[in-house]
Amino acid sequence: MYTAGANDPHVAGMAMPVFGPDEAFAGALSITGPITRFTREAAAAAASTLRDAARELTRALGGQPPRYTVAAATVAA
């Protein structure tokens, strides 16, 4: 999910969930940056890499990655 200026008008970010065994939420991987550089376009370009890293970490923790699309992760404002 991508957000821009939600808590700080100068910061944008995106996060993907990480799960452990039994679909237990373990945490999240995130990317943040200045809103002027981490634009919606930059988030779209980084989304698949972040998603893949979250899936790999989920598997390493013994979890099953959820089935979601990159498009769904980057559409939210």
Image (cartoon, rainbow, N blue to C red):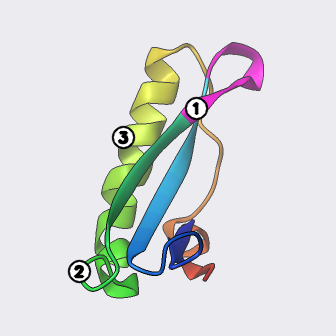
Span shown in magenta: 20-27
Q: Residue at x 57, y 64 (%)?
A: 69
Quick one: SS at disc 1? strand
Please state the total of marks drawn on the protein image.
Answer: 3
**Of the residues under marks 1 and 2, which one precedes in the sequence?**
1
Task: Please name the residue that numbered disc 1 is placed on.
Answer: 27
Q: Does residue 10 sit above or below 18 in this rendering?
A: below
Q: Residue at x 27, y 86 (%)?
A: 36
| 76 or 55: nearer the viewer | 76
Q: Residue at x 63, y 78 (%)?
A: 76
Task: Please name the residue that numbered disc 3 is placed on.
Answer: 53
| 40 or 11: nearer the viewer | 11
Task: Please name the residue that numbered disc 2 is placed on.
Answer: 37
Amino acid marked by disc 3 = Ala
Q: Residues within 10 Å of mark 3 (few under 14, many from 20)?
A: some
Quick one: SS at disc 3? helix
Quarter of the image for the C terminus: give it. bottom right
Q: Is residue 29 left or right of residue 34?
A: right
Amino acid marked by disc 2 = Arg
The verdict on residue 44 being magenta is no
The verdict on residue 21 being magenta is yes
Mark 3 → mark 2, Cα distance in angstroms: 22 Å
Amino acid marked by disc 1 = Gly
Q: Residues within 10 Å of mark 1 (few under 14, many from 20)?
A: some
